[in-house]
Image (cartoon, rainbow, N blue to C red):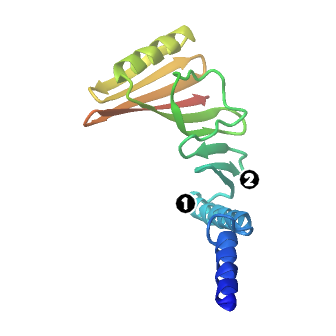
């Protein structure tokens, strides 16, 4: 019986350390898995873009820096906006950033945000007013009920804005994409 009790306690101790969330090697394994994920993501993005990139994966989003052009980008839910992202791109409050990129020279920038259970018409109207307040003139506009595309210009700057609404059951999502180009 003493041998059985010792074996049971040893097994229970081993399980508590290695199998029930108290694994001292889990943080090492997590870091290894994260690094493997980053390496795989880098290879996939490099193959798709033909460029060299660094991928830094945190919290389900990726931050990418093109080694040749210096273009910085972040994508994934709750993606981070690069430090040098232009401040003249207006942002409607409450959006979840999915993609944010900016070229090294700052002439080209892009952001994609999602808004959940908000009114697409209200968001569109807000952007129209924000662009007008910043001195932009609307040069073209196309739209149907669920989709709106407009271009705005000011001096040598062109903004292209896309607003798409998708509804399913009692849920609604609005995607806003804004691209800025400086000529």
Q: Earlier in the sequence, mark 1 or mark 2?
A: 1
Please indicate whether residue 44 sits to the left or right of residue 151 in the image.
right
Which labelled disc corresponds to residue 26?
Answer: none
The residue positioned 67% from the left and 39% from the top of the image is: 103
Q: Toward the viewer: 24 or 101?
A: 24
Q: Quadrant of residue 37?
A: bottom right
Rounded to the nearest whole Å, what is the CA distance between mark 1 and mark 2? Answer: 15 Å
Q: Percent from the top left, x then y, of residue 74?
A: 62, 44
Secondary structure beneath dot 2 equals loop
Mark 1 and mark 2 in contact? Answer it, CB < 8 Å. Answer: no
* Disc 2: CA contacts within 10 A as few (<14), some (14-19) or many (>=20): few
In the rendered image, the quadrant that contains the N terminus is bottom right
Q: Percent from the top left, x then y, of residue 63?
A: 65, 48
Q: Is residue 167 above or below residue 141?
A: below
Q: Percent from the top left, x then y, of residue 28?
A: 74, 66
Please indicate whether residue 70 sits to the left or right of residue 151 in the image.
right
Secondary structure beneath dot 1 equals helix
Residue hosting label 2: 67
Q: Is residue 175 above or below residue 44?
A: above
In the rendered image, the quadrant that contains the C terminus is top right
* Disc 1: CA contacts within 10 A as few (<14), some (14-19) or many (>=20): few
- Give the residue at the far front of this rendering: 1
Residue hosting label 1: 48
The residue positioned 69% from the left and 75% from the top of the image is: 13
The residue positioned 64% from the left and 74% from the top of the image is: 15
Q: Quadrant of residue 84?
A: top right
Q: Percent from the top left, x then y, of residue 52?
A: 68, 58
Please indicate whether residue 35 sits to the left or right of residue 181 in the image.
right
């Amino acid at each position: 019986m003493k041998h059985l009790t010792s074996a049971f306690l040893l097994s229970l101790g081993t399980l508590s350390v290695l199998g029930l969330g108290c694994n001292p090697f889990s943080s090492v394994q997590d870091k290894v898995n994260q690094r493997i994920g980053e390496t795989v993501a880098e290879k996939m993005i490099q193959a798709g873009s033909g460029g060299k990139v660094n991928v830094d994966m945190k919290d389900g989003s990726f931050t990418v820096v093109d080694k040749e052009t210096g273009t910085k980008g972040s994508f994934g839910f709750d993606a981070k906006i690069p430090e040098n992202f232009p401040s003249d791109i207006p942002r409607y409050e409450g959006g979840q950033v999915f993609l944010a990129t900016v070229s090294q020279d700052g002439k080209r920038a892009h952001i994609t945000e999602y808004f959940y259970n908000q009114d697409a018409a209200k968001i569109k109207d807000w952007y129209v007013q924000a662009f007008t307040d910043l001195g932009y003139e609307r040069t073209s506009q196309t739209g149907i009920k669920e989709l709106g595309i407009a271009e705005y210009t000011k001096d040598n700057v062109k903004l292209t804005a896309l607003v798409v609404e998708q509804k399913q059951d009692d849920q609604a999502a609005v995607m806003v994409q804004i691209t800025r180009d400086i000529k």
